[in-house]
Image (cartoon, grey):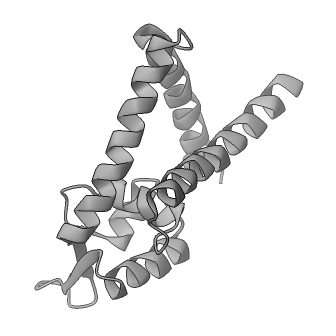
Amino acid sequence: MSGYLDALALVERLHRLLLDVIKDEFERLGVLDVNAVQALLMFNVGDNEVTAGELKTRGYYQGSNVSYNLKKLVDMGYMHHQRCEIDRRSVRVRLTEKGRGIREIVARLFAGHARGLQDKGVLGVDGIDRINASLRRVERYWSDQIRYIY
């Protein structure tokens, strides 16, 4: 039990730390109108055109959080939105040129992290692959708990 609780706490701390690292990079670059959650959201949207529901089902965000941040990003000119022709209730969003600039900052930051982990001997490719495989197994286990227990 204690190892499991340590792992849960570590996952939470790593996510918060990732947001702090992104925030720090944006402050260093003087980009102050976008927060770390919004920058990560734009990174995850990438070149796609998506709905808030799709971002939620992909597991990136909670429903109200994603809707709020998408609205803010549209208002600030980082994202473009358009009502779906088929389902008028659904709104599809995609990055504007300004939003693609933010995505590129995050992509460069992550590329630097990946190189740094390897160059400094923190984790090689095989280490990252093992971590990813383990985390995917936990994800499947938790997903099964939601689907089959309740």
Picture quarter containing residue 39? bottom left
Picture quarter containing residue 29? bottom left
For the question of whether residue 95 can be seen, the reply is no
Front residue of 93/37: it is 37
Q: Position of residue 118 (x, y in %)?
A: 45, 14
Picture quarter containing residue 55? bottom left
Whether residue 123 sits left or right of residue 142 in the image: it is left
Q: Position of residue 30 (x, y in %)?
A: 46, 64
Task: State whether residue 6 is above or below residue 97.
Answer: above
Task: State whether residue 50 is above or below residue 128.
Answer: below
Q: How many marks?
A: 0
Front residue of 68/74: it is 74
- Image quadrant where one finds the N terminus: top right
Q: Position of residue 21 (x, y in %)?
A: 57, 46
Residue at 35% across, 88% down: 75
Extreme left residue here?
85
Whether residue 61 sits left or right of residue 12 in the image: it is left
Q: Position of residue 23 (x, y in %)?
A: 55, 56
- Image quadrant where one finds the C terminus: bottom right
Residue at 89% across, 26% down: 2
Task: State whether residue 9 is above or below residue 130.
Answer: below
Task: State whether residue 129 is above or below residue 26.
Answer: above
Whether residue 49 sits left or right of residue 28 in the image: it is left
Front residue of 84/105: it is 105
Extreme right residue here?
2
Residue at 34% across, 54% down: 43
For the question of whether residue 48 can be seen, the reply is yes
